[in-house]
Image: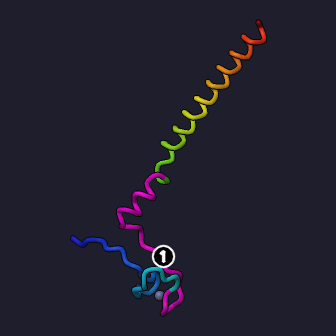
C-alpha cells in the first residue's frame, strides 16, 4: 500500500518543482499545482464546493423580501381604502 503524497512536480518528466513554481526547469511544461492539503485551505474551498446551501439562503432571503413587500402593499392598500 502506497500513500499518495501530492508534491509540486512536472507532469511530463516528473522533476520535482518548488511550491509556486509555474514551469518545469528541465522541459518547460506548466506545473499543475497539487490539490490543497491544508485544512485551513480546505475550509475556504468548502463553501464554493457546495453552492446549494448558498442558493437556498438566497431563496430564503428573496422570500422574506417578497413577504415584506406584500405586507407593505397590504398596509398601503388599507391606507388608500380609508
Ligand atoms: Zn519537466
* Mark 1 vs ligand 1: CB below 8 Å: no
Magenta-drawn segment: 24-47
Above or below 48: residue 74: above
At x 74%, y 12%, the residue is 79
Observer-nearest of 29 and 71: 71
Pinpoint residue 60: horizontal percent, then vertical percent.
54, 33
Please count the marks in the image. 1
At x 40%, y 60%, the residue is 42
Observer-nearest of 27 and 46: 46
Pinpoint residue 64: horizontal percent, then vertical percent.
58, 29
Q: Residue furthest bottom?
A: 26
Residue 40 figure quarter: bottom left
Q: In the figure, is residue 1 to the left or right of 4?
A: left
Observer-nearest of 70 and 32: 70
Q: Residue furthest top?
A: 82
- Quadrant of the snapshot with the C terminus: top right
Residue 13 shown in magenta? no
At x 77%, y 7%, the residue is 81
Q: In the figure, is residue 38 to the left or right of 66?
A: left
At x 31%, y 74%, the residue is 5
Above or below 25: residue 8: above
Majority secondary structure of magenta residues: loop
Pinpoint residue 68: horizontal percent, then vertical percent.
63, 25
Above or below 79: residue 22: below
Residue 1 figure quarter: bottom left
Residue 42 shown in magenta? yes
Which residue was labeled with disc 1? Answer: 32
Neighbourhood count class around disc 1 (C-alpha, 10 Å): few under 14, some 14–19, many 20 upward: some
Residue 11 figure quarter: bottom left
Amino acid at each position: 500500500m502506497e500513500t499518495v503524497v501530492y508534491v509540486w512536480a512536472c507532469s511530463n518528466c516528473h522533476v520535482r518543482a518548488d511550491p509556486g513554481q509555474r514551469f518545469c526547469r528541465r522541459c518547460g511544461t506548466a506545473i499543475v499545482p497539487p490539490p490543497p492539503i491544508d485544512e485551513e485551505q480546505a475550509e475556504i474551498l468548502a463553501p464554493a464546493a457546495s453552492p446549494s446551501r448558498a442558493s437556498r439562503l438566497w431563496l430564503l432571503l428573496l422570500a422574506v423580501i417578497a413577504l415584506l413587500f406584500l405586507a407593505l402593499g397590504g398596509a398601503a392598500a388599507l391606507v388608500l381604502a380609508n
